[in-house]
Image (spheres, grey):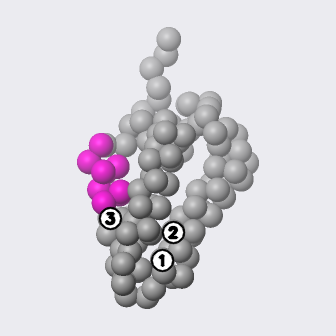
């Protein structure tokens, strides 16, 4: 089965996601960010080939739903803006990062 569409869709989602939400990963090591993309593309292709296009779309949709829940409900409920990640101090504490430098 040809899985180019599913892989291209996931690559586009990652590209748009990094443009809009890359600031949420500002302290994540670059190698982890790259590895996440590679693994997600590989698993998407494997799901598409092994189980078919409908299941690959389910696999693609689940993380999107998870991201929407986190950014649209959980972060705001815990005092963090789900679009901007502010206040930075609270978001950094949530991620287990050192506090941002003071100006």
- In percent of width and height, residue 34 lies at 30, 51
State which region is magenta. 30-38
Q: Secondary structure at mark 1?
A: helix
> Going 53% across and 74% down the picture, which residue do you hit?
57
Do the residues under discs 1 and 2 have CB atoms within 8 angstroms? Answer: yes
Q: Nearer the viewer, mark 3 or mark 2?
A: 2
> Going 54% across and 40% down the picture, which residue do you hit?
20
The residue singled out by tag 1 in the image is 56
Seen as rendered, the residue at the extreme top is: 103
User: Label 3 crowding class (10 Å Cα cut-off): few <14, some 14-19, many 20+?
Assistant: few
Q: Nearer the viewer, mark 3 or mark 1?
A: 1
From this viewpoint, is residue 9 visible? yes
Q: Is residue 69 above or below residue 56?
A: above
**Is 35 a magenta residue?**
yes
Seen as rendered, the residue at the extreme bottom is: 51
In primary-sequence order, the first of circles 3 and 2 is 3
The residue singled out by tag 2 in the image is 60
Q: Secondary structure at mark 2?
A: helix
- How far is mark 3 from mark 2, CA to CA? 13 Å
Quarter of the image for the N terminus: give it: bottom left
Do the residues under discs 3 and 1 have CB atoms within 8 angstroms? Answer: no
Q: Which mark is residue 39?
A: 3
> Going 54% across and 64% down the picture, which residue do you hit?
63
């Amino acid at each position: 089965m040809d899985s180019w569409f599913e892989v291209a869709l996931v690559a586009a989602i990652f590209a748009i996601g990094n443009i809009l939400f890359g600031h949420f990963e500002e302290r994540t090591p670059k190698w982890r960010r790259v590895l996440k993309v590679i693994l997600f593309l590989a698993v998407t292709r494997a799901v598409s080939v092994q189980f078919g296009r409908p299941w690959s779309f389910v696999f693609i949709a689940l993380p999107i739903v998870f991201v929407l829940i986190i950014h649209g409900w959980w972060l705001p409920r815990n005092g963090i803006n789900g679009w901007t990640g502010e206040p930075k101090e609270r978001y950094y504490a949530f991620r287990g990062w050192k506090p941002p430098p003071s100006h």
